[in-house]
Each structure stands twice: as C-alpha cells, then as structure tokens.
Amino acid sequence: MSLDPAEPPIPDDPEEEIIPYVGPPKLLPVAIKTGEEDYECIGAIKCKLYRFKDEEWKQRGQGILKFLQHKETKKCRIIMRQDATYFIRANHLVQETIVKSMFHQFGYEWIGQDNSDGEIKVEQFCVKLENEEDFNKFYQYYEECRIFNKDED
C-alpha cells in the first residue's frame, strides 16, 4: 500500500474494500467581520504608534493607521491594527487637538479615549511617520476628521 498522501490507496489484499480517494478537503471562503464595514476610509498611512505609559513612550505597534468615517453618523475615528497579527492597537474618535511631536521629526502627538484593550481609557499617543509626505498627509487626514467631528457635536 502506498504511503504517499497524494496518491489514492491501492489495497494489498484483493478482498479489502476500496475506499475512493477524494483528495484534500477544499476550504470555502469565510466572511470575516472586522467592525469596519459601517465605515468609509478617509485615509491610511503606515506608521509606528507609541503611547505614553509609566512616564515614558512605549511602542504600541507598527502597521496601517486608518482614518474612518461612519457612514450614518459621520463621526471619524482612528483605527490601527498591528502588522501580521491584526490586533487592534488604537481605536478612538478623532479629538480636537494635535501637536507636532518633540519625540520624532516626522511625528504627531494627541490624546484620545482609547478602546483598543476592551475598556475606555484616556491615552496619550504619538505616531512616527517615515517621511515628510506621510507627515503632511497624516495632518491633512486628522484635520479633515477633526472638522467632521466638530461639526457633528
């Protein structure tokens, strides 16, 4: 009898029942809900995200930070998922203030009521961007979202 799983089994004994070989199972696509289905993406930028904790900046994650606008309420939020694992590293509404970071040349800092760990906490964030183009895009997206959120209040 052949041990290769790619070949159908051939019985050694003619009396043995032949089981038809059907091949490996075929996996069907599964729709995965991300929670972002009710949102429209205003912009997305690759970055490193830091949060101020225990009196120092600690890296929160690296990945794509998205500015999302809810299709019905028009409120804008920031969502960032970690590269490869897709864990949520930031999830909060865009707030009123943002400042240029003292921590990095191409960075911004802001405070948000974050919900990425399952409970709402006020956190201070810093984003580190790769170049001046991303730096300017980030500010443009943030300002656009800030204005949407201000108009909705």
Image: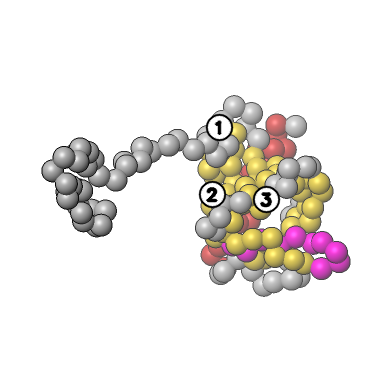
Query: Eyeballing the image, is 137 above or below 9?
Result: below
Query: Eyeballing the image, is 38 above or below 126?
Result: above
Dot 2 falls on a residue whose secondary structure is strand
As rendered, which of 151 and 26 lies closer to the eye? 26
* Among the two numbered marks 2 and 3 on one chain, the one whose residue lies closer to the N terminus: 2
* Residue 22 covered by magenta stretch: no
Label 2 environment density (alpha carbons within 10 Å; few <14, some 14–19, many ≥20): some
As rendered, which of 86 and 149 lies closer to the eye? 86
For the record, the magenta segment spans 47-56
Between marks 1 and 2 in the image, the one whose residue lies nearer the viewer: 1
How far is mark 1 from mark 3, CA to CA? 18 Å
How far is mark 2 from mark 3, CA to CA? 15 Å
Query: Eyeballing the image, is 131 above or below 91?
Result: below
- Give the labeled residue for mark 2: 43
As rendered, which of 91 and 136 lies closer to the eye? 91
Q: Position of residue 135 (x, y in %)?
A: 60, 63
Q: Which residue is painted at 38% across and 38% down in the image?
A: 29
Q: Amino acid at mark 3?
A: Ala
Asked whether residue 142 is in view, the answer is no
Task: For the C terminus, give its image quadrant.
Answer: top right
- Give the labeled residue for mark 3: 90
Label 1 environment density (alpha carbons within 10 Å; few <14, some 14–19, many ≥20): few
Dot 3 falls on a residue whose secondary structure is strand
Q: Position of residue 76 (x, y in %)?
A: 64, 40
- Give the labeled residue for mark 1: 38
Q: Which residue is painted at 56% across and 69% down in the image?
A: 131
Q: Which residue is painted at 75% across and 60% down in the image?
A: 51
